[in-house]
Amino acid sequence: MDVELLSRLQFALTIGFHYIYPPLSIGLGVLLVAMEGTYLVTKAPVYQQMTRFFVRVFGLTFAIGVATGIVMEFEFGTNWATYSRFVGDVFGSALAAEGIFAFFLESGFLALLLFGWDKVGPRLHFLSTILVCLGAHFSAIWIIVANSWMQTPAGYHLVTDAAGRTRAEITDFWALVFNPSSVDRLLHTVVAAWSAGAFFVLSIAAYYLLKRRHEVFAQATMRIGLALAVVAALASLVTGDLSAKGVAKQQPEKFAAMEGVMEASGPAAVHVLGWVDEANRRVVGLEIPGLLSWMVTGDAAAPIPGVKAFPAKDLPPLNLTFQGFHLMVAIGVGLIALAVIGVALLPGGRLFRTTWLLRVFIVSVLGPQLANQLGWMTAEVGRQPWIVYKLMRTADGLSRVVTAPEVLFSLVLFTAIYLLLFVLFLYLLDQKIAHGPLDDDLPADARHRA
Amino acid sequence: MIDLPTLWFLFVGALLGGYAVLDGFDLGVGVLHLFSKTDEQRRIFLNAIGPVWDGNEVWLVTGGGALFAAFPDVYATVFSGFYIPMILLLVGLIFRAVAIEFRSKQPGAGWRRAWDRSFSVASVASSLLMGIALGNVIWGIPIGPDGEFSGSTLTLLNPYALLTGATTVALFAMHGAIYLVLKTEGDVQRMVKGWVNHAIIVFVIGYTTTTMATLIYRPEMTALIRAHPLLFALPVATMLAVANVPRSMHHGRHGRAFISSSAAVLGLFALVGVGMFPTLVCAADQARSLTIYNASSSPATLMIMLIIALVGIPLVLGYTISIYWIFRGKVKLDSMSY
């Protein structure tokens, strides 16, 4: 295997594994603010118990997120050094801003969130929860800005030095930050992260309801989780639509691959499902003619440039991009349905007795996780063969001095370690769930035993 | 008037120096972890660094980001050139982080022993690798005409780098032991005080040997001090800070001992900076050395980041100081502890 394939596999593995955790931090962050805020307003003991229980879970997911996040930053230098030289002037600033504005905030106040219960008063603790939640969101902002710049570069110019090496340099910082895709993609990513948090707590609560354990806790958790789930799932649809329209305009090759539009020009169909025959440039499946043209332009007859309109060397892997996108959308629609049904069955607590639905909620935790992975796969695979769209090809971004055996060594090492971490994470999470919310988590006067 | 690359040399130096002072003590706690005997002692140690280690590591993440942004060619050449050590450093940092979090989650002796060992080995390895990387940057690495590292992993394991690596481990162990003295009481504190004495001796041997090796083999490291005699105050102050560590410990002024060892860490790091300036990575062929001028980002970027830094740094210092203030005092184990 060559260095490029190995480095790409390693990046895919390390980012894919890392990305299980930040959405949980973002989504749980919002929920913790809601839970602790509700406790401070209502003083209902169950909300304090809920906050403390999920803070412990948050601590676990956060630790793995931090441990695997530092790998991402280093990997730009270790495996993608040529890319780093090319983009450092632009991309590095966003990373540095992430460190200064997000990570310090998050990690500092996390200490109070986890260990500060007896060190500070309830208001200051609540403030810490809010700041950790904000920090998680800030970090999303900067990394999405950096990634969006790779999709739709703006606010830069190319400069070639005396030695003949070219790099991108900033000309307009705000044009870089608000590059054409950053806002749409940020919104879509953040609401998808809320979904990850919401269905995560719903899954745990549904499990308790099904087992008839901690029922007061579980019902209250269900209500808070469903409120966020419904907002997040619906918002994913809206922001996803905005993002897709952006892609249609800014990265037509990716859009054609996502939607399976093959003909060079002409009205385009939406494929409900399908399989891309890459060799013959056709899609087998169920399609609704003209719908895509109408969704993008408002006119069912409007032409959408398809795969055949672009040189083969500028096209991403077609079927992978297509399937990633379609599966993500299907899961997203499923999550909307689930959240809406859940809310509809809330009055009178019917939801809490509907066994089959609780079972669906238990596995629903996988939905946003899969959709997040698939969405990112679509975005990144769909950008290929470019590492920075239209500016640098992925193959040209590699480290020049790193050899295939070295990358193979690190890839095997990361695979083994991440498998171990994942198994341990699931085991510890399972233990925490089995252990359940503790009596100690209730305010002193509401505990069952002294 | 100071120019932008120089300013960023100082900023990146301040971030990495801050990292050395802060994560230095929690890495040092890891180095010493296996010397403790009981589960309760180990829990006290982990809870002593529990609320702060993660924030400390952010200094490295931000320092790395600032290096990437301000001196992308240094970041690219060093990180890709030091591929295997960098990967091992990452593995070390991963295991440290999860060991701290995972250890307390199960009561079993085997489980805890495994994470104790992970934490300690990972802390030693991380400190050693960072020391080795720093040593190589000072000693000089082979750099080709294209600006890329042209040696191998074995090139990096030269005696000078191994010496700086070992000295770093000893320095962090001393620094960590003093931190533990501050956070413990009674018998545990008496035990930890004994470690401080040993760590000081090992560190002073490493410090003296490294200084001699640097003066003999890399005399250019003194050029800036010779040109600006006032800078001679820096090595003197560093030496006094080191000497003040055992003195303060002897008088039972643990806070002062910790401030002295922090000053020693910073002083040593600053000495490296003064010795190297304006070079960031010495090349075996000096014409190819990466300097703050030939490896930096554009003035526009350095200016934008300067604004980001000026807005951000007061906030960062504010949080850091508040968190340390809130968690001051001796460790008390409770239900939310590790």
Image: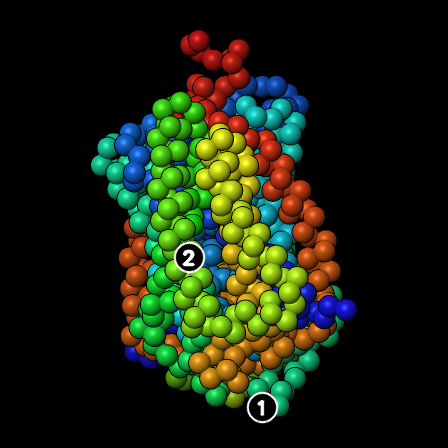
Q: Is residue A58 above or below residue A370?
A: above
Q: Disc 1 residue type?
A: Gly
Q: Which subunit holds the residue at mark 1? A: A
Tell me the residue that label 2 is attached to: B208
Which amino acid does the dot numbered 2 rest on?
Thr
Quarter of the view holding residue B180: top left
Image quarter (top left, top right, bottom left or bottom right) of the C terminus of chain B: top left
Q: Which residue is at a point 37% across and 46% down the rendered structure image?
A: B201
| Residue A348 % position (x, y) | 54, 24
Q: Is residue A28 above or below residue A90?
A: above
Residue B263 seen anywhere in this rendered image of the structure: yes
- Residue drawn where x is 41% and y is 51% of the image: B204
Can the viewer see residue A305? no
Question: Which quadrant would the N terminus of chain B be assigned to in this image?
Answer: bottom right
Tell me which chain the residue with mark 2 is part of. Answer: B
Residue that appears at 38% across and 55% down = B206
Callout 2 crowding tier (Cα within 10 Å): few <14, some 14–19, many ≥20: few
Residue at which label 1 appears: A164
Q: Is residue A406 left or right of residue A448?
A: left
